[in-house]
Image (cartoon, grey):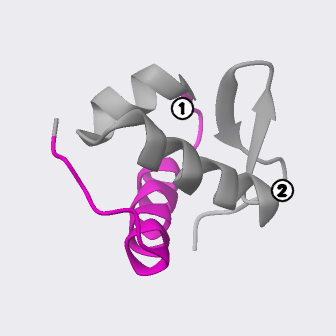
Amino acid sequence: MRAAVETPGAIAELAARCRGEFLEMPGMRLTLPQAARFLGIDATMCEQALEQLVSSGFLRKNGTTYGISAGIVRQ
């Protein structure tokens, strides 16, 4: 897993990458450990990026699973 610097820019870039992955596979549901492994990053940065997408309304969190929010269409 890559070590990364937790800057606002790095988190925003990672959130954009996560957004792209979820748009490519809209039915994908991942836990935090699964998402970190899938993206090849540490769990702390992954959580910050996923939570940013939850806050923006792009993702929803159901218990421990992240998935694309209802009504989001591929752009």
Residue 7 image position (x, y, % from top left): 42, 72
Does residue 57 appear in this view? no
At x 43%, y 52%, the residue is 24
In this rendering, position of residue 22 left or right of residue 3? right
Q: Quadrant of residue 9?
A: bottom left
Mark 2 or 1 closer to N-term? 1
Magenta: main secondary structure equals helix
- 9 in relation to 21, above or below: below
Residue 41 image position (x, y, % from top left): 28, 42
Q: Quadrant of residue 17?
A: bottom left
Crowd class of label 1 (few under 14; some 14 to 19; many from 20; radius 10 Å): few
In this rendering, position of residue 56 left or right of residue 24? right
Residue 19 image position (x, y, % from top left): 51, 60
In this rendering, position of residue 52 left or right of residue 71? left
Which residue is denoted by mark 2 in the rendering? 71
Kind of residue at badge 2: Gly
Which residue is denoted by mark 1 in the rendering? 28
Q: Nearer the viewer, residue 1 or 19?
A: 1
In this rendering, position of residue 11 left or right of residue 37? right
Does residue 30 appear in this view? yes
Q: Which residues are magenta?
A: 2-29
At x 83%, y 47%, the residue is 70
Position of the N terminus, as image quadrant, is top left
Residue 11 image position (x, y, % from top left): 46, 66
What separation in Å lies between label 2 and label 1 (alpha carbons)? 15 Å
